[in-house]
Image (cartoon, rainbow, N blue to C red):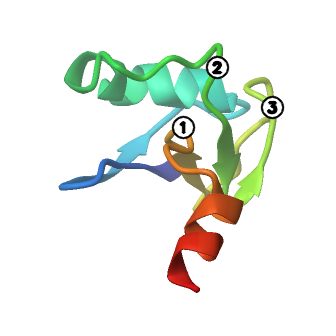
């Protein structure tokens, strides 16, 4: 099954497609992609992941054509940013 994996840092983005076995989970897909070796700062125990912008648990099965996304930690409080703009 063909799926995508993406991860974005502030200054660069990773977007790759790969073949994974049927019934693979989000976690298995991320590990098979090799992204954890490329970006050792990724911590799946604390970072959110999802499919097409919808947060999902690591044990969620992926389907053909899905885009698995690894989300970065929030570095600024959205409420504070909004206040600074005023």
Is 52 placed left or right of 39 in the picture?
right
What is the x, y in percent for residue 21?
57, 30
Which residue is disc 3 drawn over? 57
Number of the front mark, 3 or 1: 1
Is 36 placed left or right of 84 in the picture?
left
* Sooner in the amino-acid sequence: mark 2 or mark 1: 2
What is the x, y in percent for residue 54?
76, 58
Q: Residue at x 63, y 55 (%)?
A: 64
The picture quadrant where one finds residue 27 is top right
Gap between marks 2 and 3 measured at Cα: 11 Å
The picture quadrant where one finds residue 32 is top left
What is the x, y in percent for residue 66?
61, 58
Q: In the rendered view of the protein, which quadrant contains the C terminus?
A: bottom right
Which residue is disc 2 drawn over? 46
* Sooner in the amino-acid sequence: mark 2 or mark 3: 2
* Sooner in the amino-acid sequence: mark 3 or mark 1: 3
Q: Secondary structure at mark 1?
A: loop
Q: Residue at x 77, y 48 (%)?
A: 55
Gap between marks 2 and 1 measured at Cα: 9 Å
Establish if 20 lies above or below 84. above
């Amino acid at each position: 099954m063909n799926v995508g994996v993406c991860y974005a840092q502030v200054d660069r983005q990773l977007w790759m497609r790969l073949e994974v076995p049927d019934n693979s989970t989000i976690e298995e897909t991320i590990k098979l992609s090799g992204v954890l070796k490329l970006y050792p700062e990724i911590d799946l125990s604390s970072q959110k992941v999802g499919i097409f912008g919808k947060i999902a648990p690591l044990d969620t099965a992926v389907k053909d054509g899905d885009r698995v996304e690894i989300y970065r930690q929030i570095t600024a409080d959205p409420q504070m940013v909004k206040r600074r703009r005023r």
